[in-house]
């Protein structure tokens, strides 16, 4: 049995993206987690965890999303070996940019490589989604799908599972702002309404449909007009202090749209790289949080290409 270490980069993602709750996702070039692993005779062990929030992450392989996803791939692929795993977090937990999703996707993709890629990529995504279900309380693939596939993804259906991928416009730039607030996905789901008015449903169908069209036709202004949410962001906004101020600052400095990334607290801004500088948008958002005595990490980055072997 080879004891070669395999290293996988699993990127951050943003999900929901306006009206696409639990449906839309987008891979981000950075930050990303690094998941390393090698074959062992049996069992699954986590030998090291480093990076932001590492002290809060369990080393119990039955409770860690990396190893839950990896174990599911090993089982489905009929593997006759175990796995030793090392985790380097580049994505802080409770960030809204798919920290648990990157862990789950990275673990699933690592096991997929080590088993000789016997499963379909849809099966790998569902193995990662199962791990997300354990950590967040509900199975959802809107983070793990773009993390594995890259680009902009649409979950058409969960039963049967089908995911579609679109390559985003080349000039679509991303500013990722992460204020010093923790929002757990499970907690963010507790504040969501159980029913919505028909007018809000109609609003969401229209905006979700136009966003897909805009992504396919490289229409950045239409992307900006299509990212809107009448239901989920309003319910979660109180969890993120100064969210609306930060979004307004981004828009005033050139963003085509600014919105709550995933379940928050990330503030995600899209901009046109051919006409504006992301650094200007980034500093305007950072200033809002800094002026309110809050630390804020910023990445000026691009759409990502999904899990990859390093």
Image (cartoon, rainbow, N blue to C red):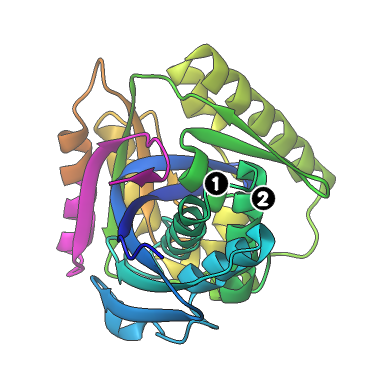
> Viewed as shown, does residue 87 lie left or right of 131?
left
> Viewed as shown, does residue 110 lie left or right of 122?
left
When asked about the image quadrant of residue 57, the answer is bottom left
SS for tag 2?
helix
Residue 290 among magenta residues: yes
Task: Indicate which disc residue 117 carries.
Answer: 1
Task: Look at 41% across and 65% down and name the residue there.
Answer: 1
Q: Is residue 16 visible?
A: yes
Residue 173 among magenta residues: no
Pick the residue in front: 187 or 86.
86
When asked about the image quadrant of residue 172, the answer is top left
Closer to the eye: label 2 or 1: 1
- What number of labels is visible? 2
Task: Look at 28% across and 43% down and name the residue there.
Answer: 249
The x and y percentages for residue 159 are 83, 50
Pick the residue in front: 46 or 193.
46
Instruction: Tell me if residue 122 comes above or below residue 39 in the rendering.
Output: above
Residues in magenta, as a range: 284-310
> Viewed as shown, does residue 241 lie left or right of 132?
left
Task: Indicate which disc residue 123 carries.
Answer: 2
When asked about the image quadrant of residue 140, the answer is bottom right
The x and y percentages for residue 216 are 56, 17
> Viewed as shown, does residue 163 lie left or right of 85?
right
The x and y percentages for residue 232 are 61, 55
Task: Look at 56% across and 74% down and name the residue there.
Answer: 135
């Amino acid at each position: 049995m080879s004891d070669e270490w395999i290293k996988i980069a699993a990127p951050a993602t943003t999900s929901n993206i306006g009206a696409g709750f639990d449906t839309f996702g987008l891979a981000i070039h950075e930050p990303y987690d690094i998941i390393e692993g090698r074959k062992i005779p049996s069992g699954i062990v986590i030998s090291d965890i480093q990076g932001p929030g590492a002290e809060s992450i369990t080393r119990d392989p039955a409770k860690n999303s990396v190893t839950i996803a990896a174990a599911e791939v090993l089982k489905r692929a009929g593997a006759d070996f175990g796995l030793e795993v090392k985790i380097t977090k580049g994505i802080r937990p409770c960030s809204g940019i798919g920290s648990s999703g990157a862990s789950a996707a990275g673990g699933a993709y690592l096991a997929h490589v080590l088993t000789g890629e016997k499963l379909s990529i849809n099966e790998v995504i569902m193995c990662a989604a199962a791990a997300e279900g354990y950590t967040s309380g509900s199975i959802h693939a809107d983070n793990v799908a773009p993390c594995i596939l890259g680009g902009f993804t649409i979950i058409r259906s969960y039963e049967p599972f089908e995911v579609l991928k679109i390559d985003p416009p080349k000039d679509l730039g991303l500013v990722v702002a992460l204020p010093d607030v923790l929002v757990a996905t499970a907690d963010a789901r507790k504040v969501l309404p159980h029913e919505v008015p028909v007018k809000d449903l109609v609003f969401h169908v229209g905006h979700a449909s136009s966003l897909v069209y805009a992504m396919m036709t490289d229409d950045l202004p239409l992307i900006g007009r299509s990212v809107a949410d009448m239901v989920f962001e309003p319910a979660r906004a109180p969890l993120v202090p100064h969210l609306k101020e930060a979004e307004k600052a981004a828009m005033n400095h050139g963003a085509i749209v600014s919105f709550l990334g995933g379940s928050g607290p990330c503030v995600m801004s899209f901009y046109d790289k051919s006409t504006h500088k992301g650094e200007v948008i980034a500093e305007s958002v950072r200033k809002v949080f800094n002026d309110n005595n809050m630390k804020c990490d910023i990445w000026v980055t691009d759409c990502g290409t999904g899990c990859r072997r390093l």
